[in-house]
Image: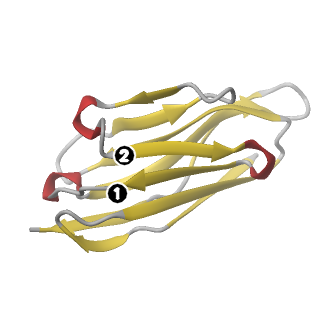
């Protein structure tokens, strides 16, 4: 199994910045894609940003130009730099990873989430 631990959430004023981190550990042979999702109260979980092992990125339209996803493959860690935060960015942010363990089994893992609250 793969364990994902997020950190870096908190309370920030509109226009401020936060940096989320997510470290993967456990039975990891390779991690292909890593990503950040978020879920606001009463809404479905949605993709915020994702990044492949090779560094290709994908962003939700609502965060393009404000958020930047990056990763450190050697540390199995993914980051989300969030700038110009808006109240509508308030949500629980979840880390996700897709890869394979040492037996070749497909692994799709989720972190427990970290709360991001943006005040107006």
Residue 111 horizontal side relative to residue 65, left or right: right
**Residue 107, visible in the rendered structure:** no
Residue 21 x/y as whole percent:
55, 59
Residue 77 horizontal side relative to residue 8, left or right: right
Q: How many numbered callouts? A: 2
Label 2: which residue? Answer: 67
**Residue 49, visible in the rendered structure:** yes
Dots 2 and 1: beta carbons under 8 Å? no
Residue 10 horizontal side relative to residue 6, left or right: left
Residue that sits furthest to the right in the current view = 103
Q: Looking at this view, is 3 or 62 the one in front?
A: 62
Residue that sits furthest to the left in the current view = 120
Residue 89 horizontal side relative to residue 98, left or right: left
Looking at the rendered structure, which numbered label has been put on residue 113? Answer: none
22 shown above or below 27: below
Q: How does the figure colour the protein chain or chains?
A: secondary structure
Image point (84%, 45%), residue name: 27
* Mark closer to the chain start, 2 or 1: 2
Residue 18 x/y as whole percent:
38, 64
Q: Nearer the viewer, mark 2 or mark 1?
A: 2
Q: Residues within 10 Å of mark 2 (few under 14, many from 20)?
A: many
Image point (32%, 40%), residue name: 45
Quarter of the image holding residue 44? Answer: top left
47 shown above or below 4: above
Image point (52%, 48%), residue name: 95
Mark 2 and mark 1: span between their CA atoms?
A: 16 Å
Quarter of the image holding residue 85? Answer: bottom left
Which type of secondary structure does the marked residue at label 1 adopt? strand
Which type of secondary structure does the marked residue at label 2 adopt? strand
Residue 6 x/y as whole percent:
54, 61
Label 1: which residue? Answer: 92
């Amino acid at each position: 199994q793969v364990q994902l631990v997020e950190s870096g959430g908190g309370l920030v004023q509109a226009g401020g910045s936060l940096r989320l981190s997510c470290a993967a550990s456990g039975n990891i042979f390779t991690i292909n894609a890593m990503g950040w999702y978020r879920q606001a109260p009463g809404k479905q979980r949605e993709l915020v940003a994702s990044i492949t092992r090779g560094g290709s990125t994908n962003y939700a339209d609502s965060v393009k130009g404000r958020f930047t996803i990056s990763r450190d493959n050697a540390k199995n860690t993914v980051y989300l730099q969030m700038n110009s935060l808006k109240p509508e960015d308030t949500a629980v942010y979840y880390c996700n990873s897709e890869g394979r363990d040492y037996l070749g089994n497909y692994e799709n893992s989720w972190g427990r989430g970290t709360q991001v609250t943006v005040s107006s």
